[in-house]
């Protein structure tokens, strides 16, 4: 791969000290608060994409060894967001693909159950729908009772349904940013021999991943939200048990031992590469995606996820205080989440609020009655009280 363009090396400035807006490339006169849908574009990622496109006019100049080295770099950088073990990471196209790998491999028999939450994103559920149909298992939903959190609902279901064999859960809700207490859930599941499958798409890059404590069987995250990279490249972490015996969805040459796969006897099956590489998807590690992902992951690594988490929490705290000062406490969640603030205005005001925000150039998303406010480091905390003031004017 080509070197990153001069002047676009990862910034090592402390993310808690400034908004670092200069590191991002966004349209003028826009306040982008929708990282939970798609991360804002880093300048380094934008420049890396252009360099890769330019290099693509002469693809013969990149050797196979250079391509493999780029794949290895991205795998290693991605692993640092999980537990630092590159052998645990597979490169896949989507979170849904990673969940499908879990659904193909985890044991499930007739009468067993898979538990999901009421707010689950469809990609966390659909593969389990198919698996349950095939094996005569059940999909059960943890629906919170009045005054109950989703964590409480999951724990209650674990206590009342002895048939549960798999939990397929999101660390952070895509609807409102609420956070599951995975420490407690994982411990309860582990004592009962229940496999844990995690979707970290709304937390990886914005919160530390405590895989040693959670001990999931599989954990996946897209790369284009809080990891600030391109679409079409996601990262699947695989527990040691499944790195040497699991069944991949695709069968292609790149997942096989390169010293054997090109032999002249097609009847002799070559072994898989080491670790989770057996689950790599074909055509995913294109030079364009790799260049963008490497630039993004290097920036996340330079800023450090623990420091990013503190900086994002500070921005959400600022938004929360501003909404409180404007008398909009009834819209606020309890407890306040970490890096995504989901507010719930009255249904009658949804359209007016959406129109007012867009007219003011404030980009958000409405999800199941919840307006999701998800800033990244391109947003300065001083910009956020104006959002609360705008919401208050519409509410009046």
Image (spheres, rainbow, N blue to C red):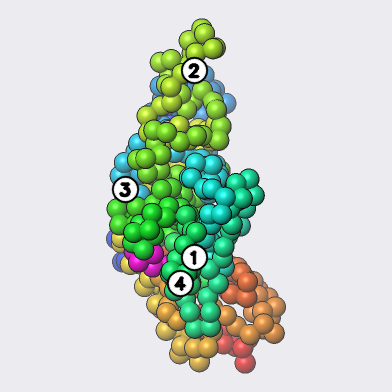
Tell me the distance, in whole angstroms, between the alpha carbons under discs 4 and 1.
9 Å
Residue placed furthest toward the top: 264
The mark that comes first in sequence, 3 or 1, is: 3
Q: Pointer 2 and pointer 4: residues touching (CB < 8 Å)?
A: no
Tell me the distance, in whole angstroms, between the alpha carbons under discs 2 and 3.
32 Å
The mark that comes first in sequence, 4 or 1, is: 4
Quarter of the image with the N terminus in it: top left
Mark sitting on residue 269: 2
Residue bounds of the magenta highlight: 178-185
Tell me the distance, in whole angstroms, between the alpha carbons under discs 1 and 2.
42 Å
Per the image, the residue denoted by label 1 is: 161
- Mark 1 or mark 2, whichever is nearer to me: 1
Mark sitting on residue 83: 3
Residue 18 lies in quadrant: bottom left
In the image, residue 342 lies in the stretch drawn in magenta:
no
Tell me the distance, in whole angstroms, between the alpha carbons under discs 4 and 3.
30 Å
Q: Is residue 312 visible?
A: no
Horizontal side of residue 360 vs 314, given as left or right: right
- Mark 4 or mark 3, whichever is nearer to me: 4
Q: Secondary structure at mark 2?
A: loop
Q: How many marks?
A: 4
Tell me the distance, in whole angstroms, between the alpha carbons under discs 3 and 1.
32 Å
Q: Secondary structure at mark 1?
A: loop
x, y (%) of residue 39? 50, 56
The mark that comes first in sequence, 1 or 2, is: 1
Depth order, front residue of 80/149: 149
* Residue 163, placed above or below residue 348: above
The mark that comes first in sequence, 2 or 4, is: 4
- Count residues near mark 4 (Cα–Cα under 10 Å), then give few for <14, some for 14-19, many for 20+: some
């Amino acid at each position: 791969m080509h070197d990153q363009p001069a002047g676009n090396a990862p910034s090592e400035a402390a993310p808690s000290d400034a908004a670092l807006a200069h590191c991002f490339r966004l349209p003028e006169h826009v306040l982008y608060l929708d990282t939970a849908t798609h991360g804002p574009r880093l300048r380094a990622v934008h420049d890396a994409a252009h360099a890769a496109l330019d290099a693509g006019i002469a693809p013969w100049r990149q050797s196979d060894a250079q391509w493999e080295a780029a794949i290895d770099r991205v795998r290693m950088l991605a692993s640092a967001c999980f537990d630092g073990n590159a052998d645990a990471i597979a490169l896949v196209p989507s979170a849904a693909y990673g969940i499908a790998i879990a659904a193909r491999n985890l044991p499930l028999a007739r009468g067993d159950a898979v538990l999901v939450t009421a707010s689950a994103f469809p990609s966390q559920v659909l593969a389990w729908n198919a698996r349950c149909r095939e094996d005569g298992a059940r999909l059960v939903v943890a629906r919170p009772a009045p005054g109950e959190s989703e964590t409480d609902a999951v724990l209650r279901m674990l206590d009342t349904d002895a048939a549960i064999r798999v939990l397929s859960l999101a660390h952070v809700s895509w609807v409102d940013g609420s956070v599951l207490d995975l420490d407690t859930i994982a411990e309860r599941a582990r004592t009962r021999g229940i496999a844990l499958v995690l979707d970290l798409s709304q937390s990886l890059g914005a919160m530390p991943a405590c895989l040693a404590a959670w001990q999931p069987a599989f954990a996946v995250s897209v790369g284009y939200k809080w990891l600030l990279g391109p679409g079409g490249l996601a990262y699947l972490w695989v527990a040691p048990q499944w790195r040497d015996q699991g069944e991949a969805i695709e069968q292609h040459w790149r997942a096989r031992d390169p010293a054997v796969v090109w032999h002249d006897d097609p009847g002799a099956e070559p072994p898989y590469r080491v670790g989770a590489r057996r689950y790599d998807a074909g055509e995913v590690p294109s030079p364009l995606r790799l260049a963008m992902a490497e630039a993004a992951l290097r920036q996340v690594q330079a800023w450090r996820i623990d420091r990013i988490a503190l900086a994002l929490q500070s921005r959400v705290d600022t938004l929360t205080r501003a909404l409180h000062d404007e008398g909009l406490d009834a819209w606020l969640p309890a407890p306040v989440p970490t890096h995504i603030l989901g507010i719930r205005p009255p249904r009658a005001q949804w359209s007016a609020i959406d129109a007012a925000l867009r007219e003011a150039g404030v980009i958000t998303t409405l999800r199941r009655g919840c307006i999701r406010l998800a800033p990244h480091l391109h947003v300065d905390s001083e910009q956020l009280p104006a959002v609360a003031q705008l919401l208050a004017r519409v509410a009046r």
